[in-house]
């Protein structure tokens, strides 16, 4: 958390409100929050913001100065947020980086990250290419169904870890993996190449549908997530299984939602999401 929908919401708000702004100054509260490119910080002062996009769970901001383009890549990690100045902030001491802007309606972009699992990177174009190639597989919103079916059929990974593996599919984390698999009636520990082609196609359709609906509802405000303008995401109201251990299955099958304890807890219905194995003749 945040995951793909929350990063997409952040990118869209930034694109709408800060493209065209000029960077007046940059403030760094902790130098270790900048993973790469701190020595290039001076270049960004006076640069214009020309674009904002999302890659996986990261937000990429493009800057232009003297006919040269550079980028700020913000990893949101588990607790990272990009916030405008007026957004209410718990524990402001966890604001570690600020871009001071002029020329648009928002005067600041703040990077707030209490647990600091995410970092910022200041990159030129070759640096951005390296950053994205080593971190991100295909984006689930543009991955076509046939490629998705091929991905599943080519591996014995379990479904949930596969959906969350950023080099395989970029942007899905624990919340949305649980919600997607429940709607697809597939067990989190189902072996991927034991999923039928029909079930894999349905899983792809549900994956895209869940992510798009979550984006439209502003993401899921779980724990400390807020959009840059401080608004909460309302998709948490659509969660069917995440963090609902012990509650009745929403399918009214008579079972209760179960939680499996591991590195990332899985929430699933043991009756609706049974592990299935293909019969080999």
Image (tube, helix red, strand yellow):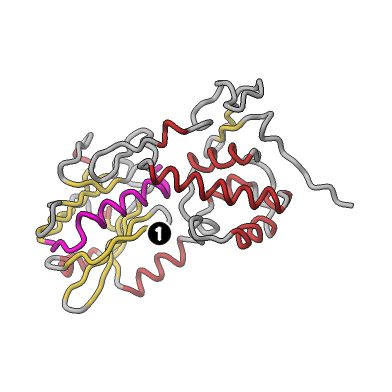
Q: Is residue 250 above or below residue 129?
A: above
Q: Is residue 206 left or right of residue 194?
A: left
| Foreground pick, 135 / 49 | 49
Q: Position of residue 76 (x, y in %)?
A: 35, 49
In the rendered image, the residue lying farthest to the bottom is 67
Instruction: Choose between 44 and 225: the one closer to the eye.
Output: 225
Residue carrying label 1: 55
Residue 181 within the segment the image draws in magenta: no
Farthest right residue in view? 281
- How far across and how far down the image is residue 193, in percent? 71, 53
> Would residue 50 appear left or right of 4 to someone viewing this image?
left
The crowding category of the residue bearing disc 1, from other C-alpha atoms within 10 Å (few below 14, some 14 to 19, many at least 20), is many
Residue 16 in magenta stretch: yes
- Residue 132 sits above or below residue 10 on the image: below
**Foreground of the two, 77 or 82:** 82
Q: Is residue 104 above or below residue 236?
A: below
Part of the protein shown in magenta: 1-23
Task: Give the mark count.
Answer: 1
Judge left or right: residue 147 versus residue 68.
right
Residue for point 59% across, 41% down: 181
- Judge whether 77 appears above or below 48 on screen: above
Q: Position of residue 180 (x, y in %)?
A: 55, 42
């Amino acid at each position: 958390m945040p995951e793909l929908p929350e990063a997409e919401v952040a990118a869209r708000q930034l694109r709408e409100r800060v493209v065209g702004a000029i960077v007046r100054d940059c403030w760094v509260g902790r130098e270790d929050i900048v993973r790469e490119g701190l020595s290039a910080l001076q270049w960004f002062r006076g640069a214009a913001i020309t674009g904002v996009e999302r890659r996986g769970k990261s937000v990429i901001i493009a800057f232009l100065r003297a006919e040269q383009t550079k980028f700020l890549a913000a990893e949101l990690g588990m607790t990272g947020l990009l916030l405008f100045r007026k957004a209410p902030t718990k524990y402001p001491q966890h604001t570690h980086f600020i871009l001071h802007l002029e020329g648009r309606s928002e005067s600041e972009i703040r990077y707030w990250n209490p647990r600091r699992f995410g970092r910022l990177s200041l990159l030129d174009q070759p640096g951005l290419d390296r950053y994205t190639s080593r971190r991100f597989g295909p984006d689930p919103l543009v991955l076509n169904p046939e490629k998705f079916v091929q991905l599943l059929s080519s591996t014995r990974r379990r479904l949930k870890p596969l959906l969350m593996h950023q080099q395989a599919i970029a942007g899905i984390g624990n919340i949305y993996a649980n919600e997607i698999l429940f709607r697809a009636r597939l067990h989190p520990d189902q072996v991927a190449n034991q999923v039928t082609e029909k079930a894999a196609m349905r899983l792809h359709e549900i994956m895209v549908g869940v992510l798009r609906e979550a984006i439209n509802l502003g993401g899921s405000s779980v724990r400390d997530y807020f959009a840059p303008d401080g608004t909460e995401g309302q998709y948490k109201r659509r969660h069917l299984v995440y963090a609902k251990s012990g509650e009745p299955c929403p399918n009214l099958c008579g079972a209760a939602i179960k939680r499996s304890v591991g590195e990332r807890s899985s929430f699933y219905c043991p009756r609706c999401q049974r592990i299935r194995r293909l019969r080999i003749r």
